[in-house]
Amino acid sequence: MSKFVVSARKYRPTTFDEVIGQDHVAKTLKNALQTDHLAHAFLFTGPRGVGKTTCARILAKIINCEHPINKVEACNTCGSCTAFNENASFNILELDAASNNSVDNIRTLIEQVRFQPQQGKYKVFIIDEVHMLSTQAFNAFLKTLEEPPSYAIFILATTEKHKVLPTILSRCQIFDFKRIQIADAVTQLKKICEKEGLQADEEALHIIANKADGAMRDALSIFDKISSSTGNVITYKDVVANLNLLDYEYYFKITDAFLREDISDVLLTLNEIVKQGFDAEHFLQGLADHFRDLMVAKIPATISILEVSDDLKKRYFHQANLAKSSFLLSGLNILNQCDIDLIRAKNKRLNVELALSKLTFLNRALEVDIFSGTTQEKKTDVVSETPVSTPKVESPSITNPAFTPSVSTNTPQIVQTPQHQIVESKPEPIPVSALAPEVTVKPDFKKLSGIDAIRESIRQAEATKAEARKNLNIDQVNEIWRSYSEHNPSKSVQSALNLAKLSLEEKTISAIVPTQVSKDMIIQEVNLLDKLRDELGAHDLIFNITVDRSQFPDFEESKPIQAMTQRERYMVMLEKNPDLGSFTRKFGLKLDTEV
């Protein structure tokens, strides 16, 4: 039989300093040992595989050690330590509450509490999975747990603290164990690789730690599985193949295709993924996670949140700065909606392909002008292949010295000039990996030419406004007004707009309408003034509406309908058509009871 020992047992921590990711627990217990403030009952709670039982055994070994080092570390040479290492200690008893959860099992344990330790100072009882005890067993254990003998210490461990009775919790010191961070798990795996003489890619270890989901024991089990199948070298490809994971290269590749608007590459990549046996839902969730990581990596200050290798962080940072934030946010929304729709979709692949097609052309989303009925296509800036040095990821802030002041027609603003060249015509698609990242930085106002430049910019802006007002005429106003009316979905608003009589004087547009109702309808059209300002090029126009019935001699307001009885209606109809009387007499028709 093989003498192989799994890594979870072989490299189990034997001191508090070796415990991974639980510094808060180790520090508290070490202080309690040094000051002799040791409680009689502990409850260790947390996820699986994070070191609860390990810490319980380390604590039990230290408190029974005859010659502890600084009171916080066992000597490993005395009789108690030797017996513990050989699993032959009579003073440390472990009970699995999952299979020993009855009242009789607890009564047997209570009987053992009565006997003093034969060697050492304390008798330690470690009860694992304590939440599995029955209510009757908990109640039988209460009194002993509250007032045990001075030589008895209880250490309870559980993954589900909420299932433990409050009366038990109140009698214990509770220590909450945290999930093992990916960085800590990777560090531990590197140490094991060095001891075992193995070579492993850092990305491969990151994948193992990520797959373990915060449990060090699970990470070591995966590590043993992969190392036994790959030999002395563990690569990223080996880990992906053994764990049946989708390679992140596919996500980078398809995102590059989105940014190039290469729909053929997108569909071919999806087809390749499906051929490897991955379903559409799995791929969609992974792509959404990739977009989320790109959002996080877009800002150097938050890139440390990504639990990946440093090389992979640089790749995320580079691709994130090629994609606009609006693209990533809208893309996440599309992916989320597609994930919801997949539950009831019959053709899941078609649903995914539709979502990917939307993402491909997301940067060229159409802006529909509801006023003029025209569509304008967003111009996508094409970045030239001019090489630009990629900023270092470790730097918390990245500066860009190239800035020029630019003044709009409203207020003077400082805008950033990117380092790369903007080209008007779109060239042949180029690899996105060659594109330089855009880096958002704060401008250095000290490099501007002073207040005189800003004053000159304001003067030019005012001159532009004055020139725009000088060229205004009523024909332009009437044309824009008519276009807005024709494309308004409400017939009532159209009627009100068509009735208005317009006039223009300097920067004031006056409209006269016959009724207050028409005025209220036009006032509610908040986009009308914005349209007039934008198309006329004068952003300080004033809009004034007045009601003047005398300006509309031919206008007739609709009269309210008068309520009439059936006989009154008949008389009105008879007055309009006398033949109705002979018709009713000929066929003997009579009116119903009047209402």
Image (tube, rainbow, N blue to C red):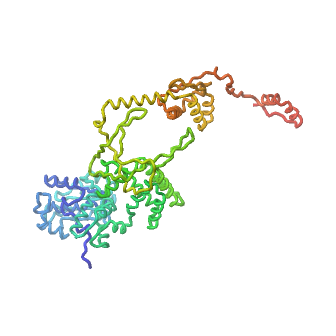
- With respect to residue 477, does 84 lie above or below? below
Residue at image coords 34%, 51%: 297
Q: What residue occupies the far top of the structure in this picture?
A: 550
Q: Nearer the viewer, residue 8 or 270?
A: 270
The quadrant of the image that shows the N terminus is bottom left
Q: Nearer the viewer, residue 502 or 469?
A: 469
Residue at image coords 42%, 55%: 288
Q: What residue occupies the far left of the structure in this picture?
A: 67
Asked whether the viewer can see residue 166, the reply is no
Asked whether the viewer can see residue 209, the reply is yes
Q: Position of residue 458 (x, y in %)?
A: 38, 30
Q: What residue occupies the far bottom of the structure in this picture?
A: 1
Residue at image coords 84%, 34%: 590
The quadrant of the image that shows the C terminus is top right
Q: Position of residue 20 (x, y in %)?
A: 23, 59
Q: Position of residue 153 (x, y in %)?
A: 20, 58
Residue 139 is drawn in which quadrant?
bottom left
- With respect to residue 32, does 211 lie above or below? below
Q: How many marks?
A: 0
Q: Nearer the viewer, residue 221 or 434?
A: 434
- With respect to residue 389, does 133 lie above or below? below
Q: Nearer the viewer, residue 209 or 477?
A: 477
